[in-house]
Image (cartoon, rainbow, N blue to C red):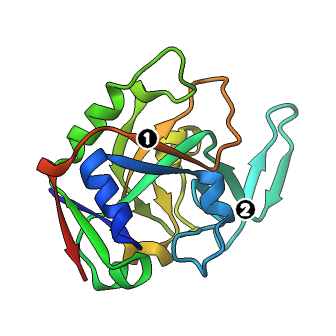
Amino acid sequence: MPTYRYFSEERFANAFITDGQMRFGSLASYRAYEDGGVRGDPKDGALHYAPPEGLEITMVKDGQKLTGVSFTTAAQNMFVYCVSNEPSDRCAKELGPFCVEISDSDEIVARLRARASGQSKLDYAQASFGSVEYRPLDTIPGVDWAFPERIVLMKPPEYVWQNESRFVLPLKADTQSADLFVIIEIGSLEHLTKLYRH
């Protein structure tokens, strides 16, 4: 199934096609990005559970029961590269008129994984790709809260228009990075891509 990446400038679209240049953003960068909720999302990579009736929390230490309003956990130390699952006039308007159709996302994941290196902070061997789930705040989180690789693929329902999937590139365990973005080149993608202008 093809996916679609939107660019504000043709030169960035061409760099993606000819060199496989990908600008991965950290979750922190998307949380801090102020653009009226188009690319930026203050809850990106966060799982927030706020049922209308509140939460009852039992303390492990003494069994005391507390009542809370909400529960939040956030994925850290991950970089994402976002694409849409369908061509969209709204995505073109909001994200940029230069649309690259990608015919094989699995090949991109394979190329990212092939970059695995003991010297890099990025855990290329764990690169992945998945569709975003748009979930309301009252959806019971189940075990999702414990898995950052699941949380990074969750967004609030107001972003459903993006119909997004993500390439996910985590940092290695016990590694930190202050980088908001990392630029990676994985080689020519000309045989996998087509460029359109909306």
Which picture quadrant has residue 5? bottom left
Residue type at the position of mark 2: Ser
Q: Give coordinates of residue 65: x percent, y percent.
A: 83, 48
Give the residue number, with chain letter if any, for mark 2.
70
Closer mark to the observer between disc 2 and disc 1: 1
Q: Give coordinates of residue 32: x percent, y percent.
A: 69, 64
Give the residue number, with chain letter if any, for mark 1.
184
Cα separation between marks 2 and 1: 37 Å
Is residue 28 shown to the viewer in this render?
Answer: yes
Which picture quadrant has residue 78? top right
- From the viewer's perspective, tell me whether residue 118 is left or right of residue 186: right
Q: Residue at x 66, y 74 (%)?
A: 34
Q: Residue furthest top?
A: 118
Image quarter of the N terminus:
bottom left
Asked if the residue at tag 1 contacts the one at tag 2, i.e. Cβ–Cβ closer than 8 Å, the answer is: no
Q: Give coordinates of residue 143: x percent, y percent.
A: 52, 42
Q: Secondary structure at mark 1?
A: strand
Name the foreground residue: 113 vs 73: 113
Residue type at the position of mark 1: Ile
